[in-house]
Image (cartoon, helix red, strand yellow):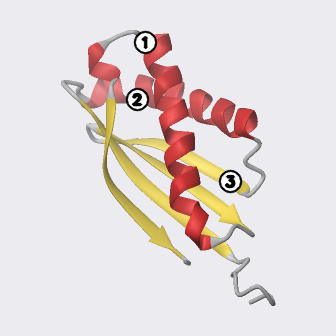
Amino acid sequence: MTATGTETGVIDLTTTVRFASVDADAVAGIAEHLDAALRSAIDAQGAGAVRGYFVRPVGATVQVGLRFVGMDPEHVEGTADELLQAALEELNGIQANESTRGKRTSTLLVGA
């Protein structure tokens, strides 16, 4: 803990995104595009606290993980929301298909 009372450790956030009417085969392709869109969102927003991430298909969903280092825990979920929203908007622009409208179904926060 620092003098300001904020923790500067490592916080991992994992969230699951479900895409309407998409089968497991199509999810793999969507995950590839979402990976690139997430990298773009991280770079564009200058999210320096994000030190690692992953995007992987899991059945008919895509799991997204972000590792935050040195960020105030109160800002982690908001930052993750902004990054994921920007990535999903970019993905929708690339795919231009109703089935690629992702919806977050669950989130797990570890280390806060």
Mark sitting earlier along the chain (2/3): 2
x, y (%) of residue 19?
Answer: 28, 31
Distance Cα–Cα, label 2 vs label 1: 14 Å
In the displayed orientation, state which residue is furthest to the top. Answer: 96
Task: State which quadrant residue 23 falls in.
Answer: top left
Q: Amino acid at mark 3?
A: Gly
Q: Is residue 69 above or below residue 111?
A: above
Residue at image mark 3:
52
Q: Residue at x 46, y 29 (%)?
A: 88
Judged left or right of residue 54, residue 69 is right
C-beta proximity under 8 Å, tags 3 and 1: no
Judged left or right of residue 95, residue 66 is right
Callout 3: SS: strand
x, y (%) of residue 107?
Answer: 38, 59
Residue at image mark 2:
28
Mark sitting earlier along the chain (3/1): 3
